[in-house]
Image (cartoon, rainbow, N blue to C red):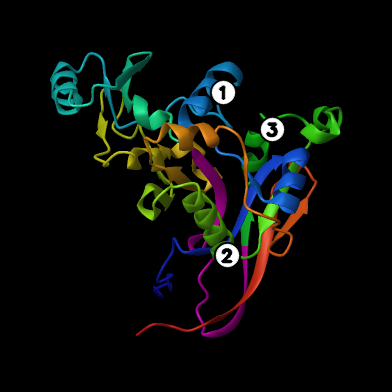
Amino acid sequence: MEEKNVWAEPDSFASVFRCTTQKYAENFFKKGEIKFSTPSSWVNYAFEKGEGRGDKLEGTMATFNIFDIERVDELNRKYKKYSDLIRMSLGERVYLKKSRDMELPCFCFYILKQSMFDCPNEEGESRLSATVPASYFRDFMDDLDPHEVEKLNQNDKPAVIFINNYKEFEQRIINALMALGLSREEIIITPVRYLDFNENGKYGWWDFGQRPPKELAIKHKRFENQSEARIIINTDDIGIKKILESPIEIGSLEDITNVSNTYLHEGISVSLTANLKFLD
């Protein structure tokens, strides 16, 4: 059986985009308006309007079944050092979270990773294709039917922002955040990892073992289609967090972005040409 080639850096990416509303997309494009949210707001959204754009399990550090007495004792003892520990119960399961981290400003975007493309078997120029599933775009619109979307106010209709030069975009955000008084170390930029919280069965448990606030970069496998990366603002500065409750402007992004005012209800295919070389 012929061995298939694999990517040397499967999680690396160049293409980035973000679902939003047409009003926000215009402000993003013309003024570089960046709106941070908090994990707690996504939890609240999930309870109010359902999973998709929201996620009840955001920020989970560990989870166990309430009847698993051994694990209840072990994990509660491990995490009791956090005076702000949240114990969220859903059915028979408990999810441990850190209250402080659930209020940290975060900004999310979709990353099109190398692993989403089939790796060619030959060197040289190749045409590569990948698919962004319909569920990604439908989640953002709470799975509304296109006919229902058409009835929305124009400002509230969906749009997609395509960021053509991610490195430049990232640097502009970092510069703007540091101008507010943040240090570079307080600006965490990381891909999200997706794990099956139920992999070990009804009585199974997980301890993700992340140093806070890196637990904010772990989500349930149900959201894998969202292929997120996140900017997490790891600060206790009340003044900066207050500023980030409202959108900040980093300057026009018209030179590095495009906007599509379309509900991509059926998903999209992405094609690109790459010049490939095998590593020894």
Residue pictured at 34% horizontal, 38% vertical: 215
Residue 171 on image: x %, y %: 52, 61
Counting the numbered discs, the total is 3
For the residues carrying marks 1 and 3, which lies nearer the camera in this image?
A: 1
Which residue is painted at 58% across and 32% down in the image?
53
Residue at 58% of width from left, 59% of height from top?
A: 169
Question: 121 or 189, which lies in front?
Answer: 189
Residue 124: say if magenta.
yes
Residue type highlighted by circle 2: Glu
**Left or right, 101 with reference to 168:** left
Which badge, 1 or 2, comes first in the chain's sequence?
1
Asked which secondary structure carries label 2, the reply is helix
Q: Residues within 10 Å of mark 1 (few under 14, many from 20)?
A: some
For residue 164, which numbered disc appears in the image?
Answer: none
Look at mark 2 in the image and give the residue it sits on.
168
In the image, residue 57 sits, relative to residue 172, either above or below, namely above
Give the CA distance from mark 2 to mark 3: 29 Å
Q: Is residue 195 magenta?
A: no
Q: Which residues are magenta?
A: 105-129
Residue 264 in view: no
Residue 214 rendering spot, x and y as whole percentages: 34, 42
As drawn, the label of residue 141 is 3
| Mark 3: amino acid | Met
Which residue is tagged 1? 45
